[in-house]
Image: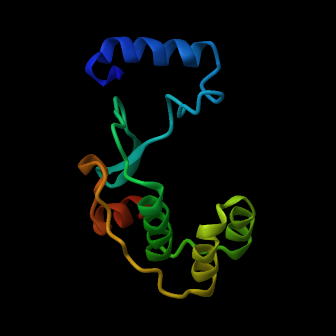
Amino acid sequence: MLKNFPNIRKFITTMTHKLQINQILGLNQIKGVYFHPENGKIVETKNYTKPFDGPVEEIVPCMFKFFQQIKLNDSSFFLKIKEFLNPKYKHLCDKLIANETIPDLGIKGNIRRRFSKDQILKAINN
């Protein structure tokens, strides 16, 4: 309802965070949540608006595919993650740890979040 009134939405969001009820209402943190590769480094994205990232069913497998591509597969870390993960995604932890290929579902969300593998790998190396 408020998407046509960005100033009102911003005010309500700011007040929610100031009153520290953002977690109760399920809002993301304001700072330090979004990052992107820039000039060979991973930096915080400033003034990022998140209209829609895509459905969870799309995002979670893409995240695990990304972890596999950058060889982030520490079994102790992902076994801890698996304890809290939605049961329908636990198989992704198993595949990552076992180094089984995770299918690439692609991503249809916000174009601002799309980066090439080279951009991300270069940023990780720095």
| Front residue of 113 and 108 | 108
Answer with the quarter of the image where residue 4 lies: top left
At 32% from the left and 55% from the top, the residue drawn is 40
Q: Is residue 62 above or below residue 8?
A: below
At 37% from the left and 52% from the top, the residue drawn is 54
Pick the quarter of the image with the N terminus: top left
| Relative image position of residue 116 (x, y in whole percent) | 27, 64
| Relative image position of residue 41 (x, y in whole percent) | 38, 52
Q: Is residue 60 above or below residue 26?
A: below
| Relative image position of residue 60 (x, y in whole percent) | 49, 62
| Front residue of 52 and 67 | 52
From where the camera sits, is residue 126 visible?
no
Q: Is residue 26 above or below residue 84?
A: above
From where the camera sits, is residue 15 visible?
yes
Furthest-front residue in view?
A: 1
| Relative image position of residue 33 (x, y in whole percent) | 49, 40
At 66% from the left and 28% from the top, the residue drawn is 24
